[in-house]
Amino acid sequence: MIGGADTIRSIVNRFYDLMDTDPAYARLRALHAPDLGPMRASLADFLMAWSGGPRHWFEQRPGACVMSAHRSIAVDIATRDQWVEAMRRAIDEHLEPGLGGSMIEALGRMATAMVRD
């Protein structure tokens, strides 16, 4: 429905490009390593599996989930909001509003679950 692996990779690349270049996402960017290449690949694989595609992300990380992968990161409300907004922008550029809105709504709930007070 969302266009397959190419669309997901385009969304992920746009998301990380925004995070890497737009000062509005500086706090979020600071939580990541200087080289975003591995994160681009990981998020793309996760989103492909999450959306019903190949499950490589889970196969490469037996027993892991996206929550456990972020356990050591200090996600707060501000970084959650930056993540959701950058992802919303990336999704909006690649998907129809109804489908994109549903996707960001689900991802936003996931991001909210990662917030630690």
Image (spheres, rainbow, N blue to C red):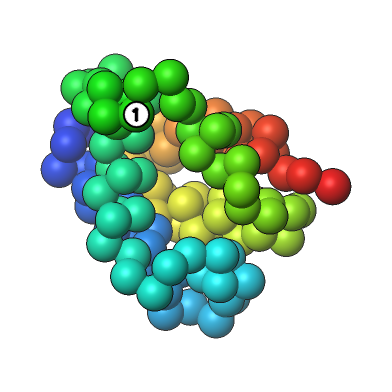
Q: Of 3 and 56, which appears nearest the observer?
A: 56
Quick one: which residue is furthest to the right in this view?
Answer: 117
- Residue 91: x and y in percent read 39, 47
Q: Which residue is mark 1?
A: 61
Q: Secondary structure at mark 1?
A: loop
- Residue 7: x and y in percent read 21, 43
Q: Of 51 and 32, which appears nearest the observer?
A: 32
Q: Of 66 and 63, which appears nearest the observer?
A: 63
Quarter the N terminus occupies: top left
- Residue 116: x and y in percent read 77, 44
Residue 18 seen in render? no
Can you tell which quarter of the image residue 112 is in? Answer: top right
Quick one: which residue is furthest to the left in this view?
Answer: 6
Residue occupying the point 29% across, 18% down: 52
Q: Is residue 47 above or below residue 81?
A: above
Q: Is residue 62 above or below residue 7?
A: above
Residue 43 seen in render? yes
Residue type of the residue flagged with mark 1: Arg
Q: Is residue 101 above or below residue 72?
A: above
Residue occupying the point 48% across, 27% down: 65
Residue occupying the point 61% across, 52% down: 73
